[in-house]
Amino acid sequence: MIEFTLPKWYDLHTHFRQGDVVAPYIQAHLDMGCVGALAMPNTKPPTAVVFEADEGGEYWSVERYMRDLRDAGGDQFSELIVPLYLTKDTTPEMIRKGAESGTLKACKSYPPHGTTGAEFGIPVTEFIDNGVFAAMEEAGIVLCIHGEEHGLPPEQYFDRAGNAEELFYTERMPRVREKFPNLKIVCEHVTTKVAVDFVHSSGANIVATITPQHLLYTIGNLIQGLKYHLFCLPVLKHCADRDALRAAVAGTDNTKFFAGTDSAPHATKATACGCAAGCFTGGIAPQLYAQAFEMAGVDLSDVQGQDMFKNFLCLNGAAFYGLPVPQETFTLVKEDAPVEMLKTSQGDVTPLPLGLGQQNLPWSIWR
């Protein structure tokens, strides 16, 4: 039986939502060895001001959402980061004051209407010119960016010749990189070889997160039988893209790619007008990542393979965000483990494997 022990890890891109469902979502992360998290600010209203004193009817504050998360069990995390949602009302002064207070660690850029809760996002080019990115660069604030071009016709959004993510990383991000060479950037949930190549060609200040589903599956898995529990944004891509993601995380010299699950719980996934974007991987992400590493050809019974996995899951993200590597540990074991529904006050949430008809995982966690 294969087993290896790892330091507890930080999920550096996840969704905890709002209200009384937050507690079970946080508990699911604690159950999978998480010692901290970066919680997305696409709340309703969005978390788009730093201080409670600046709240209005349209926006929540980082201070408020952080307090709500801690009250719901997030106080068990050693580190909790809530990025500021960048909107038309974000100013350089907000960045400077938030950084000076120590409250602001990161900012989130959404493409307008590009995913769940992204209706307050504005084009990234506006932050290039309005002083916000300059203030972030000066203060050392991390830019967490959902890298897709917005407002495209269907034939450009997803086509054999290209897609929204590839356009963004060939047309938008090179301009950001050129104008702000020291801005710390996390290219979140990358899905394409183009995005991977952009990160590889950039300095140490530009890194990326990768989700379990984008390492495991392709667009073919999604559309064959229309497995809607696998629908997320950015949408799954092709085999060549998945191969590039796997090569990026499984390299012995990987320092730039790390875990960010983008775990997105939905009690109602399919609706009359479409499908909610996001895969729920809370509670099982390390097991899914281990499965993906094995599919990429990594021998997790070998010390070198285990070190590759540890770099990706536990070390690279902590180093980029300046977080301590925890002394606490958990153990991954190569033995079948059942996958169970998560019960909440708003209904059952289906973990991704169950949504795909997979009742058991080949890895389990011992704590």
Image (cartoon, helix red, strand yellow):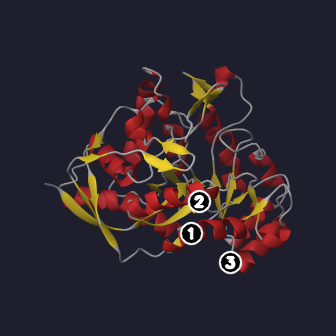
Give residue 39's mark: 2
Between marks 3 and 1, how big is the CA–CA gap? 13 Å
Mark 3 Cα-neighbour bin, 10 Å: few <14, some 14–19, many ≥20: few
Identity of the residue drawn at 65% across and 41% down? 116
Residue type marked 3: Gly
Residue type marked 2: Ala
Q: Secondary structure at mark 1?
A: strand
Q: Is residue 224 visible?
A: yes
Quarter of the image holding residue 330?
A: bottom left
Identity of the residue drawn at 84% across and 52% down? 88
Look at the numbered discs 1 and 2 and tell me whether their residues touch, using CB distance below 8 Å.
yes
Residue 146 screen position, x and y as percent: 63, 46
| Residue at the farthest front position | 345
- Would you place residue 150 above or below residue 329 in this image? above
Residue 326 screen position, x and y as percent: 40, 75
Residue 143 screen position, x and y as percent: 65, 59
Residue 210 screen position, x and y as percent: 47, 48
- Left or right, 127 with reference to 365: right
Which residue carries the number 3 mark?
102
- Left or right, 366 with reference to 139: left
Between marks 1 and 2, how big is the CA–CA gap? 7 Å
Q: Earlier in the sequence, mark 3 or mark 2?
A: 2
Q: Secondary structure at mark 2?
A: strand
Which residue carries the number 1 mark?
80
Q: How many marks?
A: 3
Viewer-closest of 194 and 46: 46
Viewer-closest of 105 and 32: 32
Q: Secondary structure at mark 3?
A: loop
Between marks 3 and 2, how big is the CA–CA gap? 17 Å
Residue type marked 1: Leu
> Nearer the viewer's eye, disc 3 or disc 2?
2
> Nearer the viewer's eye, disc 3 or disc 1?
1
